[in-house]
Amino acid sequence: MPALVATPSSARLAGSKRFAGTAVQARPALPLRAPRAAVQTVAARAATSKATYICVDCGYLYDGSEGPFDKLPSSYRCPVCSAPKRRFKPYAGATGRNDSKSMNARFEKVQRGEGLAASGKADNSSLAAGVVAGAVILGGLYFALSSYYN
C-alpha cells in the first residue's frame, strides 16, 4: 500500500479549510528489509562454516579436508583421540599444524580456557537443573507447611 505524503499542489482536500492548498500524493513504499534476526542468523551460519574447530580432548584442529564442519555427520570422530563431534568447539586462537608439539600446546591453552571462540551456545544445563531443583524444594516446602498448619 503506498504511503501518503502531503505536498502543495493544485488539488485540495474536500471539505477542509485547514488543509487548503495541500494535496495528498502517493509515494512508492520503501523496499522491505530482512528482519535483523534473520540477517544475524545468516551471518552466524557463514561464520561457522569458515571457523576453525578444535578437539577439546587432544587439541586437534579440524582442517576442513572433509568439507565444512557443520556438514559433517554426527558420527564424525577426532582422528587422533576418537572423541565424538560434540567435543569439538570453535577455536579463535592461531591455527597451525597438527603435530604433537602444537597439539599439546593448544590442548593446554584450551584447558586453561583460552582460545575458545564464543559460539553463542552456552552450556546452561547446570543452570536449568538448579532451577528445577529449587522449584521442587520450594513446592515440597509449600505442601509440607500447608499440611502442617491445616
Image: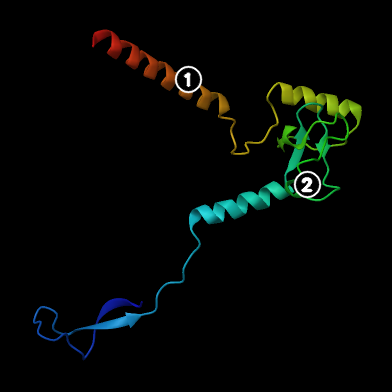
The single residue placed furthest to the right in the displayed view is 99
For marks 2 and 1, the one nearer the N-term is 2
Q: Which image quadrant for residue 63?
A: top right
Inter-mark Cα distance, 2 to 1: 36 Å
Residue 89: image location, x then y, percent: 71, 35
Mark 2 surroundings within 10 Å by alpha-carbon count, few (fewer than 14), some (14 through 19), many (20 or more): few
The residue singled out by tag 2 in the image is 72
Taking the spot 90% from the left edge, 27% from the top edge, the residue there is 100
> In the shown orientation, is residue 124 left or right of residue 6?
right
Q: Residue furthest top?
A: 148
Query: 55 or 134: which is nearer to us?
Result: 134
Above or below, comparing residue 115 to residue 65 in the picture:
above
Residue 121 screen position, x and y as percent:
60, 37
Residue extending farthest bottom: 10
Residue 38 figure quarter? bottom right
Three-letter amino acid code of the residue under disc 2:
Leu
Q: How is the image coloured?
A: rainbow
Give the image location of residue 142, x and y in percent: 33, 16
Residue at 46% from the left image edge and 71% from the top image edge: 31
In what quadrant of the picture does the N terminus appear? bottom left
| Kind of residue indicated by mark 1 | Ala
* Pick the front one: 102 or 123: 123
Provide the secondary structure element on which disc 1 rests: helix
Q: Which residue is mark 1?
A: 133
